[in-house]
Image (cartoon, grey):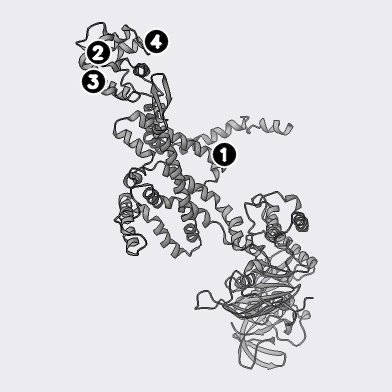
Amino acid sequence: MSEAATTAMLTTADGRPLKEALATAQARARRKAFLLVLPLLLFVLLTFLIPIGYMLKRSVEHDGFSASAPELDAWFAANPGFDYANPPEAAYAALVKDLARMQVEKSTGIAGTRINYTVPGSISLFKGGARAAKDLVPPYKEALLAVDAAWGEPRLWRGMESASSKYTTEFYKVASDRKLTDDGWAQGGDKERIYLYLFFKTFLVSGIITVICLLLAFPIAHLLAVLPMSKSSLLMIMVLLPFWTSLLVRTTSWIALLQEQGILNNLLVWMGIISDDSRLPMMYNMTGTIVAMTHVLLPFMVLPLYSVMRVIPPSYARAARSLGATSWTTFRRVYLPQTLPGIAAGSLLVFILAVGYYITPALVGGADGQLISNLISFHMSKSNWSLAAALAAMLLAAILLLYWLYDRLIGIDRLKLG
Amino acid sequence: MASTGQDDAFVAFEHVQKSYDGVSLVVKDLNLTIGKGEFLTMLGPSGSGKTTCLMMLAGFETATNGEIRLDGRPINQVPPHKRGIGMVFQNYALFPHMTVGENLAFPLEVRGMGKSEREAKIKRALDMVQMYSFINRRPAQLSGGQQQRIALARALVFDPSLVLMDEPLGALDKQLREHMQFEIKHLHENLGITVVYVTHDQGEALTMSDRVAVFNDGRIQQLAPPADLYERPDNSFVAQFIGENNKLPGVVEELSGDKALVRLATGELIDATPVNIREKGQKTLVSIRPERVEFKPEMMPAGIHTIDAEVVEIIYMGDILRVVLKVAGSSDFVMKMRNTLGQTRLAQGQKIKVGWHPQDARALDPM
């Protein structure tokens, strides 16, 4: 105790507290170091953190309806908890006013699209309503219902109330396969579970690819680590070759190899192993996706494994052998445990890359081999940014969760990437 | 003393040759027998083939030709894990992902030994090196000397009758190394095991071994007990490699039995003992240990030839004084003087005459 007290009270020769003196002395060096990393920090901020932040914002924000329907916004704000099955005349009056304004401002499409996310069919409903709005006379309820009876649906009113606020969690609800019904949000039927099913499939396929990569990469990495330098550099070039080839060229070669009229099938038919009318479907399905992605991602498994194996001295294996272990026991109990950091790093890397992979499944996946990224891309191409952002955010969350699990189970400091 | 006869040889190398590339031989026709309980050291510069011999004995390298026998049984075709030889490696090779206890349990587990028996053996082995309290540590938490002890305990825990050590003390500092030399020596004596020890440190070889095999260029240059090796080297390589040596090149002027007279290049005559000299007129290299050179006439035997010398430098080394002399035209002749109270003090530039006992000057093959 007394020793700790004296340590805490240490001062410099001229009486300043030691900690303060140390901080001043090191401040200059720290500022310099900070200036050195500043460019990268700015780069990461501009090109990485800001876009991700923007994407996350888009997943909870959409003003397509709220900006074009001020009257209805005000009415919803003043009448919380109204009867969705039978909205009063005032609500219809506000709606008709807003529809007329949309027609003038040409914002019918944007507003209709916003509602369409939760209530399918709303785009055409809004277009029809807006065209008719300026000619409608009170009572507006009967008038609008006469234009289209769908204006009276409770789920439409629920959807419009929810969309009258700029911020919403609806996109996450849609992305997790929930549906807006007349009675509020509900779990969709089994056939409608496209997103969660695709998430599950993506993780499963990524897991399969990771395992195949590990099985293929382990012997290669070991060979790289034990071969003499001249031979291992040649092998290394062969491992890295996929990196240096255009993704499209690689993928196209797989198509040429594996398609139904492709080289492999022709060979099998020619050798009489399969008949001409039972050619194996290996392309434009899940098999194609797995084969092509494994090929692309293999170096990401080889390199961390190699970097770990290279520094395992051969004397460990020799020691184990001299102590009486068979070569299998030596591998299992001495070599394999020491490669674990490499296995963990490679698996994490391959898995995370595979989960977000887009081009390869898009090119060779066909209908069956699409992954979640392809769906995100699909929604982006349909200008459905918010839903795409919500799906991407869920993917990010899943990966962060995996990363956290990895850190808890293995420890991130044991990661060795090369 | 260990027996070294052919009949009860525990380890035998017979005409063993080893080539890695099929072009040159790393080990050339090795014949060596090691008796049970012997401490044999293979000493030599790097690349002399000593480690290759050890690896062939351990089973990590296969002999290109010849036969290796262990306890009368040929082991050329026996895989390393069935040879039952304990081995201590240069970098210890303790498994980093296992604790000390698990490291020691490893050889016992692969032999299918039960838990209680295992624990007793581990305790005995760790007590032997005074490391039982470290049983739950990992190798990374131990100092170099402690890791060395654990490596030793692991090599001994399964009671092998032969233990190989490949420069086991190379990574330790001088003081610790000397301490460990004694510990290994004592373990060897107490356990009665056979030890084959590889080193390039001649001091280590001389202090620990029953016999030393000096390797160079893939051959054993001399196989002898330490004292013989130091005092009676067979050839110039051994004389140069073991300890410090003065070499005087010359030509044999007279040869009679165990006496030779050598005329140096500068014309002086010196006395020497012929070792591998066959005839008069042959070129030779006379080697004399620095501590056997005398400069006081009363210390030299009567009737020997002395030679002129000039003091070039005197280096004070504490227990001894190293005097560098200019002898026969070259300034690298060294004389060691004990630093005693009554010792004559020499001065730089002083002219003296040096001589030696003819037995201490060995006329060897010219290098």
Chain of the residue on which disc 2 is drawn:
A
Disc sitting over residue A82 in the figure:
4
Q: Which mark is residue A128?
A: none
Q: Position of residue A294 (x, y in %)?
A: 41, 51
Identify the amino acid type marked 1. Arg
> Which residue appears at 59% of the width and 56% of the height?
A332
Q: Which residue is mark 1?
A: A408
CA gap, disc 2 and disc 4 = 22 Å
- Asked whether A83 or A353 is in front, the reply is A83
Which residue has dot 2 on it? A146
Q: Of marks 4 and 1, which one's residue comes earlier in the chain?
A: 4
Pointer 2 and pointer 4: residues touching (CB < 8 Å)? no
Residues at marks 1 and 2, CA–CA distance in whole angstroms: 62 Å
For the residue labelled by badge 1, is the local secondary structure a helix, a strand or a loop?
Answer: helix
Are callouts 3 and 4 both on one chain? yes
Which quarter of the image is occupied by the C terminus of chain B? Answer: bottom right
Q: Is residue B97 visible?
A: yes
As measured in the structure, the alpha-carbon distance from the residue carrying label 2 to the one carrying label 3 is: 15 Å
| Chain of the residue under label 3 | A
Q: Earlier in the sequence, mark 2 or mark 4?
A: 4
Q: Residue at x 45, y 52 (%)?
A: A213
Q: Dot 3: few (<14), some (14–19), or many (≥20) neighbours within 10 Å?
A: many
Q: Residues within 10 Å of mark 2 (few under 14, many from 20)?
A: few
Residue assigned mark 3: A127
Label 2: state its secondary structure: helix
Between residues B292 and B125, which one lies in front from this camera angle?
B125
Q: Is residue B145 in sight in this rendering? A: no
Residue A26, position as x, y percentages in the image: 53, 36
Q: Amino acid at mark 2?
A: Ala
Q: Earlier in the sequence, mark 1 or mark 3?
A: 3
Judged from the image, the secondary structure of the residue bearing numbered disc 3 is helix
